[in-house]
Amino acid sequence: MAVSMIRTALGISHNKTALSTWTIQGGMQVCAQATLILTIAHDPGSATGAVWNGQALTNQVSNRRAGFIEGSIWTLLSNPTSGAGTITVSWAGQAVTAKAAVMTQITGVTAVSGTKTGNGDSTVISTGSTGTISNTHYIAAGMGIEGVSASRSTGVWQLDANQQGQWRATSGGGGTTNIVIDEGYAVSQPGGVARSARFSSIIANDWVGMGWSSC
C-alpha cells in the first residue's frame, strides 16, 4: 500500500551576520520516516555541510550566479527516528553574510528522481525541464533572488510546481545587499511526464533556481 504524501512547513529563517556556521533553527521536530528538506539561498560561497539533530543532510542540487548569489537544496531522506533537533549549515573556510532558508518535511517519498537548475538576471526564473518521471512524485523548487528588499516582490509560481510554499528575506543595508528564498511545490503528481517550475513577474535581479523531484 502506497504511503500518502503529506507536506508540512517546518520553519523559515534569515541572518545577515557573517558566519561560517549558521544555526538556522533549534528544536525543530521531524517525524519518523519523513524526509526533511532544507532550501537555502545566500551570498557567494558554496555551502559545504548541513546537519539536523546530529544527522548529515545530502546536497541534492546546488546552483550559483557567479559573484552574486548561490543556493542549494539539502535532504534527509526517510528520517529513521522522530525527534527534535537543531539544524545548521556550514561554509568551510569562509564567512557568509546574507542568507535565508526554509525547512519542510514530506512523508511518502524515499528517493530523489531528478534535479534541474537555472540562473540568470531577468524577471522570470525557470528551472528548465526534468526527464520523464515514472512514478507518482513530489516536486519542489527553490528560487533565490539577490538584490531585493525584505518584501517578497511580485513573484508567481507556475507550471508544475505551482503551489506557493514558504519564503524568507534578509533586510537592512539596502536592497542590493539582500537575499530572498522562495519555495514552490506540488504533491502527489502522476508519473509518465517531465516536470518543470517557473517563478515569474519578479523584479529583475540576479537569481538562481533549483528544482528536484522525489518518489
Image: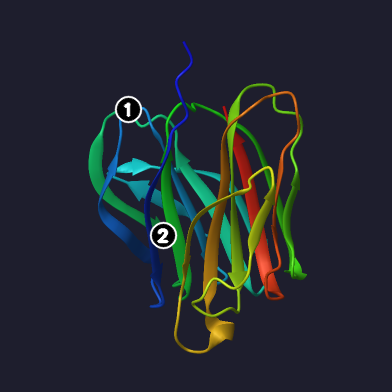
Callout 1 amino acid: Pro
Helix, strand or loop status at disc 1 = loop
Q: Nearer the viewer, mark 2 or mark 1?
A: 1
Helix, strand or loop status at disc 2 = strand
Quadrant assignment, res 11: bottom left
Count of labels in the image: 2
Residue, disc 2: 90
Q: Residues within 10 Å of mark 1 (few under 14, many from 20)?
A: few
Question: Could you say which is closer to the camera, residue 49 or residue 134?
Answer: 134
Question: Which residue sits at x=41%, y=29%?
Answer: 78
Q: Earlier in the sequence, mark 2 or mark 1?
A: 1
Question: Which residue sits at x=53%, y=49%?
Answer: 73
Query: Compared with residue 166, is residue 128 higher up or lower down, i.e. above or below?
Result: above
Q: Is residue 194 left or right of residue 75?
A: right
Where is residue 52 shown, x and y percent of the image? 33, 46
Q: Are marks 2 and 1 in contact (CB under 8 Å)?
A: no
Where is residue 113 shown, x and y percent of the image? 63, 30
Q: What numbered label is drawn on residue 80?
A: 1
- C-alpha span from label 2 to label 1: 23 Å
Question: Which residue sits at x=54%, y=83%?
Answer: 177
Query: Which residue reaches farthest bottom?
Result: 174
Query: Which residue reaches farthest top?
Result: 1
Callout 2 amino acid: Ser
- Asked if one can make out residue 108 in the rendered structure from this viewpoint, the answer is yes
Q: Is residue 132 left or right of residue 95?
A: right
